Image (cartoon, rainbow, N blue to C red):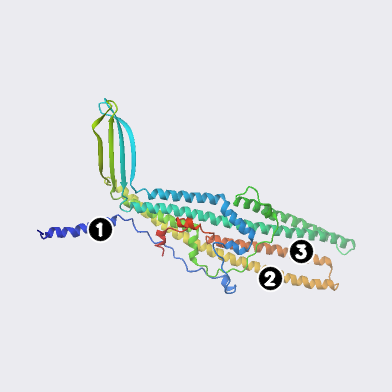
Amino acid sequence: MLRPSSPRLSLQRPALLLALCAGLAGCAAPALPRLPAPLPAAFAPRTAAVLPPGTPVPDPQSWWKTLADPQLDALVDEALRQNLTLAQARSRWTQARLLQRRDDRRYLPAASAGTRTVQDVTASDSYLHASLDLSWELGLFGAHESVGRIAQARLDAAAGAEQAARVALVADVVRRYVELRAAQRQVALLDALQALDGRSIEMAAVRQRYRLGTADDAAQARLRQLQAEAQRTQPALAAAQALRALAVLVGRTEPDPAWSTPAAPLALGAVGFGGVPADLLRARPDIRAAEAAVLKAAGEQGLAQSDLYPHVALGASLLYSYNLTQYRRGTADNVPGIGPVIDIPLFDWGRRRAQADAQQEALQEALLAYRQAVLEGVADTESALAALDQQALREARLREARTVQEQRAGQRATLRRLGLASDYEQLADQRTALQADLDIADAQAAHVLAFVGLYKALGGAPMPAPEAAAAGAGAPSATLAQVRP
């Protein structure tokens, strides 16, 4: 027969339900903090004011292909395959992924077996104990989730380090190649200057013989020749150093002889960066590393918080005992046991509380470091954009000056055809033209290097392969990505 429940029992059920909900809520890790990263929607437009509308913006994942040099493309591809520093970074990412798998299994049931010999208290008998132990740490109060955050942060940091190695590698390959081609161009121009000064010496001697010039003219021509020869040593050394550096970057012991063949220096055409989205900054390795540090600090803070509560585990064991002295089994040789294992913080609770407070402060420090990394990334990119604009302006003005000089040289050529000027005066125009070409070559290289610096500031390099990204290396932590502002 059914009986109505007592009022006391009806009041206890909601209380028990509330207590159970509170206990389950306490088992969760602390919520992840929001990343304080106020980024502008786009960087301040600069080049858009001088470039025509619709100017293409280079792809940040293959930005060096804007230079349209097949040999450079081949060098970058070879470096990405063969560079030893990048290979080490990939190995560290693989290690982090394996450690993450280890940490994922930390809160799974575990079994162990072992044997040992023991003696009784009277030292009259020896026993062989064989045991089978089962344990399952539950990871309550957010411990399991916090360990997962720390493992993910380790993987994110390794992925950021791999990305940093990739960014630096691509930028170094392009920079060294640009330096090589610019140095080869400068060497060729300085050789032409020396040959021109040699002709000046010969013509000055002829003019002196016919009393049209003085010995000082020949001395000045010789002085200019020696100066050009001395100036040639610097780009020649730069070319040799660039060849050796390229060999190291692509994992070779010797440079490829084909690299030494002079070729046209790299030139940067019209590219637009008037509204570069600031979200590209999230690919910067230092920002990814700072984000991983926030996630790691959050995991450590969660672990320290879980240490304030009891640790609960389930355990079971089976003990088998055999008397080695009497060669017989005992009457109670099989001893099974099962039950919970509870570690309650009592006397060291104050120490654990201090540790939790310290980890909370460490999390705040990581958030400040992330904000600092973002601000520095914005400043670096703005500076790189300004440098690119200024170098582009410098190259354009030098080219305009070269055009004016060609016009003046054309006027003097007309005078020579009319017999109003001599060939000796033409040498001065040719020397001025070669000096202008040297300045343009230097400005052209500086313009391309500023382009390299911009994409290095943006963290521009090929992203990891799809399989690596699917494993968690190519993207930032999903947990932190969900709490971005």
Between 376 and 91, which is closer to the camera in this rendering? 91
Q: Give the mark nearer the N terminus: 3 vs 1.
A: 1
Instruction: Specify the quadrant of the image occupied by residue 399.
Output: bottom right
Label 1 SS: helix
The residue that mark 3 highlights is: 431
User: Residue 120 at x, y = what percent?
Assistant: 26, 29
Between 264 and 395, which is closer to the camera in this rendering? 264
Tell me which amino acid carries mark 2. Answer: Glu
* Few, some or many residues within 10 Å of mark 1 (<14, 14–19, 20+): few
* Few, some or many residues within 10 Å of mark 2 (<14, 14–19, 20+): few
Tell me which amino acid carries mark 3. Answer: Arg
Q: In the image, which disc is placed on residue 153?
A: none
Which mark is nearer the camera, 3 or 1? Answer: 1
The residue that mark 2 highlights is: 400
Which mark is nearer the camera, 2 or 1? Answer: 1
Query: Residue at horizontal 28%, vertical 25%?
Result: 325
Label 2 SS: helix
Alpha-carbon distance for marks 3 and 2? Answer: 18 Å
Which corner quadrant holds the C terminus?
bottom left
Q: Give the mark nearer the N terminus: 3 vs 2.
A: 2
User: Residue 31 at x, y = what percent?
Assistant: 35, 59
Alpha-carbon distance for marks 3 and 1? Answer: 88 Å
Label 3 SS: helix
Q: In the image, which disc is placed on residue 21?
A: 1
Task: Left or right? Give the position of 246 relative to 154.
Answer: right
Which corner quadrant holds the N terminus?
bottom left
Instruction: Specify the quadrant of the image occupied by residue 65.
Output: bottom right
User: Residue 198 at x, y = what percent?
Assistant: 81, 58
Between 285 and 46, which is closer to the camera in this rendering? 285
Alpha-carbon distance for marks 2 and 1? Answer: 77 Å
* Few, some or many residues within 10 Å of mark 3 (<14, 14–19, 20+): some
Task: Left or right? Give the position of 414 relative to 293.
Answer: right
